[in-house]
Image: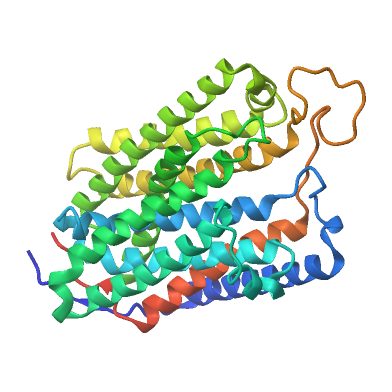
Amino acid sequence: MTALSHQCLKPRGALYGLWIAALVIAAVAGLYCAYTMEHAGHHITGMTNRVVWGLPHVFAVSLIVAASGALNAASMASVFNVSIYKPYSRCSVALAISLLIGGVMVLVLDLGRPDRLIVAVTHFNFRSVFSWNVFLYTGFLLLCIVYLWFLCERRYQHQIKRIGLAALVWRIMLTTGTGCIFGFLVGRNSLDSALLAPMFIVLSLVTGTAALALCLLAIARSQQNPLPVATVRSLSTLMIWFVAALGYFAIVHHLTNLYVAEHAASERLVLGGSMAALFWIGFVTVGLAGPLLLLMKNLIADTDADYKTQKRRLQFASAAALIGGASLVYVIIIGSQVSAQRLFPGKTVLASSFGDVGNASYQPSLWEWGLGFGGVAVGLLIFQLLLRLFPFTADRQHS
């Protein structure tokens, strides 16, 4: 066992410079896209009166949910005393902060009136789940900042478990609140389900662990100090359980919707309509089956044999899990809006123009893609900056 110390991460080289330049360009492009949409109006996007939450909301929700799950390593080390994750606690909290800021930025810029943000955060309707999330997001950010402070100060080491437990409870509340945004929408036939809250919690565990694994692998490569085999296998085990749990909740959710007659039309859209390809290929095949097959091979493989292959499997499985998670969020958010609404249950509507007859179409514009990727770039830039300015990366790994 080697002594645990931390350092600032200051990689050099042409590839690192290109990486930072690409993130800066993507972030600036995202801000320009937001500026253009605000001044020209949402008619330049693919959004309509029926699809009011477009692709940027998919990016925002995916980032916010992943931010909650990125805290997994810190929670495992502080609350559950899993020593293998202690070197990565600071990095885990820093990633959670960065992803949350990136996601909230996209959310605020996509609402159309970012100049009225002060009004939104000072006037609350506590019967609205949106008002709850203002407190959940800001509270999570403040808790993570205090968490990092305690992790870096030796005099507060005896308080780490308490702040870690508070952060764990708060992150569960945050993802529950995010799931309830959609689960409480009784006007959308494919939503209106309490199962969305636990499904979003599990989704956060999958995408957050995947994002953290990719970041740890990239950091280890820049330090020329590979992750220990035990860490790779432990992350693989966690991912298997989380992905399997997500698949279980997705199955229960869709079986429930198939059982309820009023949700049948929206389920046909997801399982066999315009959303079917994204659901079956993006989520089920890439996001569930792919990671499970890759990671099961890691656990079956000999512990010390072919370490590079095990690391590569974890890398591909994590990337696939992120794609699958984003696909699921797209199906939930966009699929619920393009499907026809039941405004008059039990009645036959002969003619209508209010979105209750037929499925709508939605094609995201370049401006929406730019804003979404801009938020991802901002989150990664903040993460790079935190690692460069503060000693958040372990320079000696536990063996």
Query: Among all residues in the image, which is located at the extreme left?
Result: 1
Q: Say above or below: 301 vs 208.
A: above
In the image, is 40 to the left or to the right of 72? right
Q: Nearer the viewer, residue 305 or 378?
A: 378
Residue at 20% x, 60% y: name it: 78
Q: Quadrant of the N terminus?
A: bottom left
Residue found farthest to the bottom? 389
Q: What residue is drawn where x is 51% and y is 31%?
A: 285
Question: How many callouts does the rendering have?
Answer: 0
Tell me if I can see residue 230 in this picture: yes
Up-down: is 358 above or below 364? above
Residue 281 sits in which quadrant?
A: top right
Please name the residue shown 43% across and 30% down the image. Answer: 249
> In the image, residue 358 lies at what x, y percent?
82, 27
Q: Position of residue 8 (x, y in %)?
A: 32, 80
Q: Quadrant of the C terminus?
A: bottom left
Q: Is residue 379 left or right of residue 57?
A: left
> Horizontal and vertical percent for residue 115?
71, 75
Q: Is residue 356 above or below residue 117?
A: above
The answer to whether residue 69 of the structure is visible from this angle is: no
**Relative to residue 37, is residue 194 depicted above or below?**
above
Q: Nearer the viewer, residue 386 or 305?
A: 386
Q: How far across and how far down the image is residue 282, in percent?
A: 57, 36
Camera-nearest residue between 125 and 200: 125
User: Extreme right residue here?
Assistant: 351
Quadrant of res 390: bottom left
